[in-house]
Amino acid sequence: MGRKPGAERTFTVTIEAPADLGYDVYGVPEGSKVDIELRLDAIMEGILATGTASARATGECVRCLDSIDNAVVIGFTELYLYDDAPEDQKSEDSFILEDELLDLETALRDAVVLALPHNPLCGPDCPGLCAECGARLADDPDHTHGDAIDPRWSALSQLADQPVRTAETSESGNVPDDSKE
């Protein structure tokens, strides 16, 4: 490409996704196909890489744990400085051309990770799971467990399920037969 400012090249490539292209719950699976459209422009300081990456991101909804599989298109722009650039232009975050080659992996990973939602949802109105039993609320929107009982009074509900003790039952230990024959 040369170092003449204004020189330009355009590439369309398909690569395998590197590891860690996303989060634990959502990301582009390692080895899956990533289509990259890339434009390289020579400028005074180095090479400006501008492009878009298209891939499939998979994972789980953080509310209901359903599978998610979405197409993602992510744009990125990075400046790769020439290796002989002045030291005052370089920093530890700068990308440097090595033997006239640039490595897009770090720039691609940064762009993808920043573009993906940290808490992915299967849909914007996902109700999630029941906090009491774990049932998926989207499958049963009318799901309830009855009126909630204040935990301080929950012991009283157990008394309601026990038979009533009378004077006869406390002496003999038997429950009287009240049926008339």
Image (cartoon, helix red, strand yellow):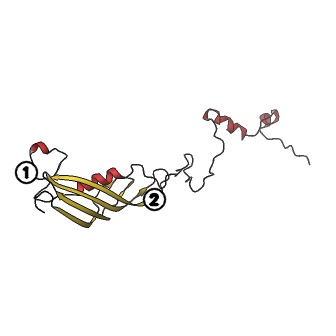
Is 124 situated left or right of 163 in this image?
left
Seen from the viewer's position, the closer of residues 36 and 28 is 36
The numbered mark, 1 or 2, whose residue comes first in the sequence reads: 2
Residue located beneath label 1 in the image: 84
Give the image location of residue 108, x and y in percent.
Answer: 27, 56
Is 141 situated left or right of 67 in this image?
right
Seen from the viewer's position, the closer of residues 167 and 132 is 132
Is 135 situated left or right of 65 in this image?
right
Give the image location of residue 9, x and y in percent.
Answer: 19, 64
Seen from the viewer's position, the closer of residues 123 and 177 is 123
Residue type at mark 1?
Asp
Residue located beneath label 2 in the image: 67
Please, what secondary structure does the residue beneath circle 2 have? strand
Please, what secondary structure does the residue beneath circle 1 have? loop
Q: Residue furthest front?
A: 6
Residue type at mark 2?
Ser
